[in-house]
Amino acid sequence: MGATISSAAGENAISNALADVRARIAAAARKAGRDPASVTLIAVSKMHEARAIESALAAGQRHFGENRVQEAGAKWPALKTPNVRLHLIGPLQTNKAADAVSVFDVIHSVDRPKLAEKLAAEMAAQARRLPCFIQINTGREPQKAGVDPTEADACITACRAMNLDVAGLMCIPPVGEQAALHFAFLREIAKRNDLAQLSMGMSEDFETAILFGATHVRVGSAIFGARA
Ligand SMILES: *Cc1c(COP(=O)(O)O)cnc(C)c1O
């Protein structure tokens, strides 16, 4: 009985948090003079259990983000329905490219030509053409994944030449810096390369990201609570 009550409470908390995040997205979009429907909310469920994901699914959430191929491959086959879209938002090793292509529907973390090449080959082999975002290391942080901004244009051109479906760009601003500067920078690189989609903004800064043109926001803790 106790377990039932507490899981119902958990489900309520997630559904309330989702409603709150959706309302904030809509308000930010309107403030930017944009259609709220132009922003896709990706609920980042990494490190959260199936039960939490089921609550989000029950609340109508359809786009989810995971940062590890192995974790997603273990959790999602039992949960996924045809209208759910799974986004890979974490760094990808080339030896996991085949699994990534079969488990995910969108890849946000293409960060080097060698990986792009491997993904393109796997997509051809599996007859699955996944939209991809190229991750740009806008803060040029040595420990962070992403293409150096000075190599962005060349990398985008190379990925397109591999017949990868390059949908847009992704970034994770450095902690402690003004995210807005990084969002504006990413938007500028996308614009000059004729890319329409921007994956940027997390729990702390998704409203700012929307003001700067984010089409995909990746929100975890504001929906599911703190991760262990
Ligand atoms: C974990 C993660 C998020 C979500 O972060 P929150 O602060 O919990 O919203 C977004 N993007 C990436 C790449 C992540 O790894």
Image (tube, rainbow, N blue to C red):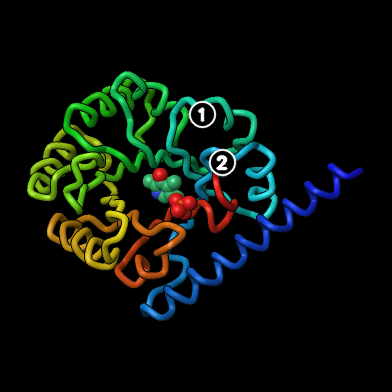
Residue at the spot 44% in from the left edge and 34% down from the top edge: 104
Q: Amino acid at mark 2?
A: Ala
Q: Quadrant of residue 2?
A: top right
The residue located at (64%, 50%) in the rendering is 56
Where disc 1 sits, the SS reads helix
**Residue at left 49%, top 72%?**
26
- In the image, 132: left or right of 29? left
x and y, in percent, of residue 173 in the image: 28, 55
183 w.r.t. 137: above or below: below
Q: For the residues carrying marks 2 and 1, which lies nearer the camera in this image? A: 2
Q: Nearer the viewer, residue 67 or 122?
A: 67
Q: Position of residue 19 (x, y in %)?
A: 62, 65
Q: Which quarter of the picture shows residue 79?
A: top right
Q: Dividing the image into 4 quarters, which one contains the C terminus? A: top right
C-alpha span from label 2 to label 1: 15 Å
Q: Looking at mark 1, is its residue's CB closer than 8 Å to ligand 1?
A: no
Q: Secondary structure at mark 2?
A: loop
Query: How far across and how far down the image is residue 135, in percent?
Result: 26, 45
> Across the whole image, how many numbered discs are drawn on residues?
2
Q: Which residue is mark 1?
A: 71
Which mark is drawn over residue 152? none
**Image coords of residue 113 (percent x, y):** 16, 32
Nearest to the observer: residue 76 or residue 36: 76
Ligand 1 lies under 8 Å from the Cβ of mark 2? no
Kindly identify which numbered label has been placed on residue 228: 2
Tag 2 near tag 1, CB within 8 Å: no
Q: Residue at left 26%, top 62%?
A: 177
Q: Quadrant of the N terminus?
A: top right
Ranked by sequence position, the earlier of labels 2 and 1 is 1
Amino acid type assigned to the residue bearing label 1 in the image: Glu
